[in-house]
Image: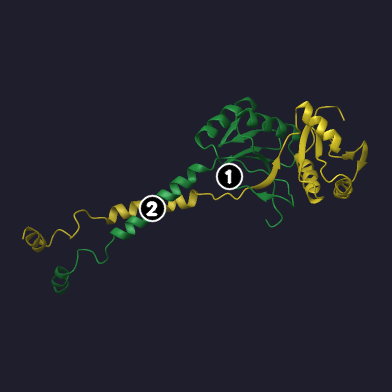
Chain colours: A green, B yellow
Amino acid sequence: MRGRNHQEEEDGHGIDLAPMLDFVLNLLIFFIIITSFIKQPGVKVTKPEAVTAEHKDNGNIIIAIRANGDIWMDRKKVALPDVRALVERMHAERPEDTVIIAADKDSQSGMVTKIMDEVRGGGIQTVSIGALGQEQ
Amino acid sequence: MRLRRYREEEDASETGIDLAPMLDFVLNLLIFFIITAVFVKETGLTLSRPAPSNQEQKKMDEKGTLFIAVHSDGTISIDKRVIDPAAVRANVERFHAEKPEGPVVVVANTKSPTGVLVRVMDNVRLGGVSNVSIAPSSSGD
């Protein structure tokens, strides 16, 4: 009975949730956008190590080459001739993105150069080969 | 006046809609996206191809180009002389001292392992030459 009397003077809720809700929604939108930017290959590869490896700022398109020669891109296994079309589409979506070829250290380097040519043909000129820096 | 009366009814809360269930849902969604979000910090080496046009080729020849071959079994050679992977850096440093502008081309056999290729590129960069490009070769060696 006492509680009821008391409540009448205050709001229905103890705390006003509206500002918190605003903030949380902003955070939510931020994370939704972030997740859609980066094209993860979807497989894990053992990358070679390099002391002079540098951080690639716009390296959002990652093409993985497994040791057996399989190409993975955007969580799908793709064939070599399809790489160009996929890169063209991604380039149209976000022109500032660059490509990182994450090749397994046991993969054949001929595959790397082939993919590099396909990516160039697809319109993205800046291609890097993924390598683990010293500090990692 | 109407508002006052509404308040007196005391069953309805102050806000029109109860935000709590929506907030629960949004928080769950938020946690899901935080967990699935990946902040990749990709590191790597920039790849470039040797200049294709004839004029550029001539310019390259004038400056002198160091060709490092990577064979299908992972061995490395300069001028048909097989060298140790650790010696690449010293060779590149010597070349760089002689011809500071000269580019380095890594001629990689298509069947050579990528790990060796990256190691060679890394050593070339350590040797002071940043102008390094790779060219594939499909010859049988």
Is A63 on the left or on the right of A30, as rendered?
Answer: right
Identify the residue at horizontal 58%, vertical 44% (top origin).
Answer: A58
Between residue A82 and residue B133, name the one nearer to us: B133
Work out which residue is located at the far right of the displayed protein and give it.
Answer: B81
What subunit carries mark 1? A
Where does residue A11 sit, x and y in percent of width and height? 19, 65
What's the residue at 89%, 48% (across, down)?
A: B94
Three-letter amino acid code of the residue under disc 1: Asn
Pointer 2: what residue?
Answer: A26
Using the rendered view, name the quadrant where residue A87 is placed: top right
Sequence-earlier tag: 2 or 1? 2
> Is residue A131 visible in the rendered structure shown here?
yes
At 16% from the left edge and 72% from the top edge, which residue is drawn? Answer: A6
Kindly identify the amino acid type of the residue bearing the numbered disc 2. Asn
Q: Nearer the viewer, residue B58 or A124?
A: B58
Per the image, the residue denoted by label 1 is: A58
Label 1 element class:
loop
Residue B55: x and y in percent read 78, 28
* Crowd class of label 1 (few under 14; some 14 to 19; many from 20; radius 10 Å): some
Residue drawn where x is 17% and y is 69% of the image: A7
